[in-house]
Amino acid sequence: MKNAKKKIKAAILIIGNEVLSGRTQDLNVSFISNWLNVNCGISVEEVRIIPDIEKKIIFNALDLSKKFKYVFTTGGIGPTHDDITALSIAKAFKVKYGFNKEAYSILEKYYGKNNFNDGRKKMARMPSGSSLIYNPSSAAPGFKIKNVLCLPGVPSILKSMIGNLKKYLTKGKVVSEKNVSLYTVESNIALELENIQNRYLKKNVTIGSYPFFRLGKVGVSVVLRSDNNLSLVKCYNDIKKMVSLKKIKIFK
Amino acid sequence: MKNAKKKIKAAILIIGNEVLSGRTQDLNVSFISNWLNVNCGISVEEVRIIPDIEKKIIFNALDLSKKFKYVFTTGGIGPTHDDITALSIAKAFKVKYGFNKEAYSILEKYYGKNNFNDGRKKMARMPSGSSLIYNPSSAAPGFKIKNVLCLPGVPSILKSMIGNLKKYLTKGKVVSEKNVSLYTVESNIALELENIQNRYLKKNVTIGSYPFFRLGKVGVSVVLRSDNNLSLVKCYNDIKKMVSLKKIKIFK
């Protein structure tokens, strides 16, 4: 992985009617975003969830590809009729859609020549010029073309492949996070947090405030993020001071 | 709720750094989408997740507002500095941002005059001309302006408010779903499913195929959706016939 000195921005494109309809709970956004942030210093700045419709995949893949350094897609690279991601991405970039020799050979070996039916062969078809993203759990590879990296939708398979993205990515400045959970309500600390945020805006620290309700208790998680560790720690200490002055208890 | 004879399309706009960073797992998309589909015949056709950045909220709210009959936003309507949804939506529609009298009075009553601080008052500020979406769990209302309906990000509060959306929505044709889970792999039924899908394309039935891995078992969920019940049942029966011919077991 190469290194860049600045923040690198990415988008995720979730392709799948089942996620849009609410039938399937997406788990890939939080996993990919966390992994990119911690391991690659890449920050996900936009996510879109769209249906399995060719023209929508083409439009959104191109749009996000222009706006972000990387686009990660999930879903639609399996063997069935509703798996149209590879074909759509080929059309988006106006390249041929056909068998990738390496993918074909990986899949033929995995299934055995006699069981390598048309559905399985389809998973070796991708945009011409793609590089493979290897799949240690179920063989069928993902692929990268230009700045678009296509992954499967099944979370367990996606997780098994994620490390194989690294060689295609330039590493950005890692954003660190500190957080503290408080026994209070947001409106009790809103003014103080705003003042602290204003002091740290130029130092690139962002403060988020998130109410929660768990085990019958009400609280607020205050989350600080920055690529500047020194400012992050200073800001964190200011918040701890404020909390102590207001006699607010901290969740352990 | 008024009734329309055709399908009604909507979008969801999730506003929040915490969802983008992967820190918070979104649960609102699946809940809202399911609720709209079952109760209102409204189909979610696009979701976007964006950061708490004013110009991004303005751009995406307007863009989705033009493309869809309804836009549902979540997040950013609380009392803290990072809650900028109401102000941004006011700017998007070029209307004033100020106190909504009814919301002010609801919140003043809820907190009591002596505890109605500036953070709490902020939750009564919204785009001029908004209608309220009442909140039975924590008082602070959501709001509707034009075709944009703004809800909170905390899932439990959002759930408590969802019924209060109904009066603002026109009911579309409800899409029904049937599904069957099979002891097989996708590539074993890909060809057959494609043939069945092709026969039912003009009858408005869509067939989705989703592999799963649970409790150590591998299977495929086949999901049929249609606003035409007769075709849905016919298509379902064709799939059951195919499954029986191929001697595939059904998950009970």
Image (cartoon, coloured by chain):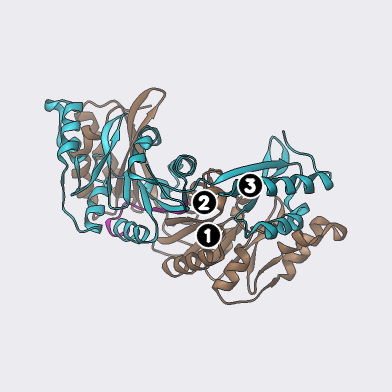
Chain colours: A cyan, B brown
The residue pinned by badge 3 equals: A230
Q: Are marks 3 and 1 on the same chain?
A: no
Residue B32: give its label.
Answer: 2
Mark 2 belongs to which amino acid?
A: Ile
Q: Where residue A181 appears, x then y in whole percent?
A: 70, 41
Q: What subunit carries mark 3? A: A
* In this view, A210 is above or below B165: above
Mark 3 belongs to which amino acid?
A: Leu
Residue B72: give its label.
Answer: 1
Mark 1 belongs to which amino acid?
A: Phe
Q: CA distance from mark 1 to mark 2?
A: 9 Å
In magenta segment, residue A53: yes
**Observer-nearest of A193 and A233:** A233
Q: CA distance from mark 2 to mark 3?
A: 41 Å
Crowd band around label 2 with a 10 angstrom C-alpha radius: few (<14), some (14–19), many (20+) = many
Q: Residue at x 53, y 64 (%)?
A: B57
Q: Which residues are magenta?
A: A44-56
- Circles 1 and 2 in contact, beta carbons < 8 Å: yes
Q: What subunit carries mark 2? A: B
